[in-house]
Image (cartoon, coloured by chain):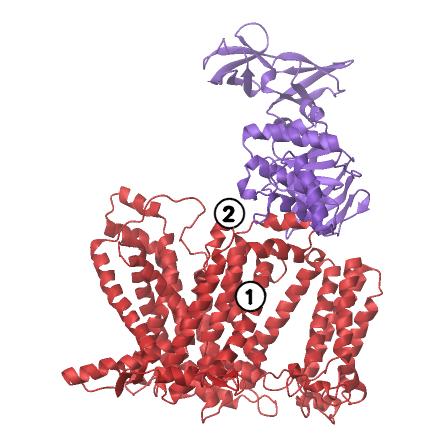
Chain colours: A red, B purple
Amino acid sequence: MMNGNRRLDIVLALGAAALTLVPWYRIEGGFFGFGWLADFPSGAQTAPGLLQIFTHGRTWLVGVLLLFAVGCLARGMCHPMRRGLVLAAAGGLGLLFLAAQGLAIGFAGWTWTISEALFGTLSDGQPSMGAGAALMAQVFVLLFAFGLAERGAMKGDAFIVGAISTLVFLVAVFVFYPIGSMFIGAVQDFDGSFNPTDFVRNLQDPGIWSLGCVLGAEVCGVAWRTLFLAIMTALGSTLLGLAFALVATRTRFPFKKGLRLLTVLPIITPPFVIGLALTLLFGRAGVVTEALSSLFGVEPGRWLYGMTGIWIAQVLSFTPISFLVLIGVVEGVSPSMEEASQTLRADRWRTFRRVSLPLMKPGLANAFLIGFIESMADFGNPLVLGGSHGVLSTEIFFAVVGSQNDPARAAVLAIVLLCFTLSAFLAQRFWLSGKNFATVTGKGDSGAHLALPRGLSIGVHAVVIPWMVFTLVVYGMILVGGFVKTWGLDNSLTLDHYARAFSVGFDNGGIAWTGVAWNSFWTTMEIALISAPLTAIVGLLTAYIIVRQKFAGRNVFEFALMMSFAIPGTVIGVSYIMAFNLPPVEMTGSALILVACFVFRNMPVGVRGGIAAMSQLDKSLDEASLTLRAGSFRTIRKVILPLLRPAINAALVYSFVRAITSISAVIFLVSAEYNMATSYIVGLVENGEYGVAIAYSSMLIVVMITVITGFQLLVGERRLRRENRVAGLSQTSPISVRQEKTA
Amino acid sequence: MTIVKPGSVVFENVRKSFGSFTAIPDLSLTIEPGTLVTLLGPSGCGKTTTLRMLAGLEHPTSGRILIGGKDVTMLPANARDVSMVFQSYALFPHMTALDNVAYGLESSGLSRRQARAKADDGLKLVGLAGMGERLPAELSGGQQQRVAVARALVLEPQVLLLDEPLSNLDARLRRKVRTDIRELQQRLGFTAVYVTHDQDEALAVSDRIIVMKDGEISQSGTPRQLYEAPASPFIADFMGEANVVACEVVATEGEQTIVRVGGLEHRLQGRNAKPGAAKLAIRPGAITLDADNGTGIKGRVLHSAYLGDHIEYEVETDVGPLFIVDHAVDRGFSPDADVTLGLKNRGVALITA
């Protein structure tokens, strides 16, 4: 009980601070600028919650004050069950009240007509929530959690209940609130009343659903085009991935190591770079186009700009992912199955067709669905190569930023896209779950995999070798492209592009970052460095809770988290600008929104990695620590974290790299002050400055390779031990977490 | 190292459900301070759940648990004055043996130096002096087990909990370690609750054995009571093998009871049994075998197996098939031989339940 009082006192003190010591509302110049200190606490903008109520007429905040007071009074109660109930009620109601007043009262008074009719008009509105309100929300969450813990939830472990409540709260605010407000925004008028005409009109737009191409007209609706492209990309990348996986595991191919290196490529490649390299090869002024034109007189065409080009770029981008998934599947087929088949007088071909391939089927379906989701969500390649006929993700972008500026249309397109990807995700989750035959057991499975039948072996080599060469050429283009003056016109080598992007001057004894890229480069590094550890913490904590704690709604919790995987970045971007542009939460244009976006988009990967690693740790280790008088926090710090080091490193590297390479959500959220490298490069491409764009991209790739290698070396320094369980863990490379990439 | 004050353990009407499944319907038991009590039973009988509730790793659905007279029902594991030796040992693989032993001491608020000094004593106590700097993976199975015991003991808990501590050791080591644990417990005088499914182990180490079945106590008592006076066919069969056969109580004469089984009259010590139908538990070694002459239970040998120092027989009789262990290896009966069976004085118990 002593312990319970101490943590409660701390939280109550925080609550008091939230009401008195920090500005309740959002500060225009940014909280961490500390410009608000000048006229704190008397100014109307900077006043803390308490003064807002009594001197600035924000009387509705009294509800917050009262519920917090209830929490304070409960501190003195003795009966733990009753005290728990009061605390939980105060916290829960406080949070609800805080959210309700924030949503109901905007800049100019009531945002809902119904509340205006009920309570009369308000003379004054309120700005967005600021530090005080955010802190108060967290205090209410913790009061709620402590209340539940005192009533014996989670065996009375306040840390665990607090962590679960906070996570649920954060996921609700940063994943479900934006998506929800996008849905609502689609059917709302400017004054907030229900008006679905725009929504219905957009939903029936022939531009989305037309089946023209089947009926003989020129083009189909964008939804069908996207679907068709996704299916073709998924097919292509799955088949190629399977060919690669077979070559890597079932043949005597001499460059298997190199093949495996391929899997690293998509991690470090910004998504539009492939498209960029393809234009350098096959665009109107591309090397190949020029060569063909001069040698055979083939007329330079624009065939690359459209579905074909996007398809090639996507297959190039996603084959490594499918390879990564399928290599596990192909290796997972137990050799003894194949040996058994042989002893039953089946030849190699029959064994492959009747035993190996059926065993791989669920894995193939999985790879197909991942390719499908990736293609649907891909934004970078269609943006570079799309030409006049875009896909859903680019259409969403142009609906928001283009001349149309039609948020309702963007919302509708986003909803359509979301439906596609979520269906694929649900199919993957429910249809495929439990159908995995890949048998990796702890037992040593002796025996060797059977070599491929001769005909098939020749076939897969014939596919893999050219494709590998093609991939190498494409990546070669990326590295070389930065040194060529003007593609097609003047192919002489130059350092100009690098100089323009990354020049450094010395000015008055200090270094002046004169290159045009430095600004966005440092911003990117800063944001990536801030969000990486946050992602790792949130992801691994979630993994710990999912694996180790049993609570009502755990499956729903896990499912909801994993679902955010299937939300394409473009949808996230659109929903974020729709949700966080107005009170109660206003974050657009700040670094905060970028960090939040990265943390909640990349967290599921940390969760997956954490779950995989933690499932390998014997649960009795935690229990032993608990019986040795350690609390769950100490258990995590002293026992779990040290054993999870590889998973932590993987999560850190992954989220760092993803923050650098991602574009789809980011492009909506950047501002002049906080521009990210990727969106800056896309801007360069749009201005036709291919040279600088390519130079910048290869620079990013080099930086990421350096970072990944650095982390790998750190992991390698770990003390080695014979313990099997841990040895298995230490082999988890950052790459293995990648399987779940979504653009 | 001394155990300051061994604690008692009391369960009052404890019930534990997991969802719709009730592992323990209603359990009450008392464990005297300073004794070693074994929870024995087949897998799934609730013995491990009982131990985990005592440790605070599970919380009862209803009822009260008291340790050393103090109600700990809702206390989390880290706030209870007990410590536990896990079946898998659960040694932290990234810490040395010494750090493992010092872990609990540091959690309890001792400084690092004090904790390590005390942990050193703990390792000495279990005969691992000088091994402190090794990682668990560099210790043998028996040594790991002793580190686990030391880690639990240095906390000087009121009650030490042992969850099948010997199950990961080979048979030869098992006998030695169980003797060591018993010797340590008697020397330091702590209360210990020991979970096992192996009745030999239970008989060897316990002051008292509590046999559980389906979440309920079947019988509790000293090893001798359980073995020699089983209260039910289940106990009789579980505490070392037994043939349970139908019999009839003919009469009681003072300290002795006369029973009739398959045409044989037999005198048993003690018990005021009511005349009428009853059951008899006969240990496999308590049956004598003779060629087909004289009086006794008539039977025919079904199988026999030579096992070096004894021969095992399965004999078909009027009262059902009997399993017999015969130490007279010189004289073997081959299958289909007709035999006459008799009963020895020891190893035959009347079951009244």
Residue located 78% across and 75% down the image:
A16
Please, what secondary structure does the residue beneath circle 1 have? helix
The image shows residue B231 at horizontal and vertical percentages of 69, 27
Residue located 78% across and 88% down the image:
A42
The amino acid beneath tag 1 is Ala
**Residue A721: which disc?**
2
Q: Quadrant of residue A312?
A: bottom left
Q: Is residue A34 visible?
A: yes
Against B277, residue A56 (above or below) is below
**Residue A536: which disc?**
1
For mark 1, name the chain.
A
B215 vs A545, nearest the viewer: A545
What residue occupies the far front of the structure in this picture? A509
Against A330, residue A20 (above or below) is below
Relative to A215, B2 lies left or right: right
The amino acid beneath tag 2 is Arg
Pick the quarter of the image with the C terminus of chain A.
Answer: bottom left
The image shows residue A47 at horizontal and vertical percentages of 75, 86
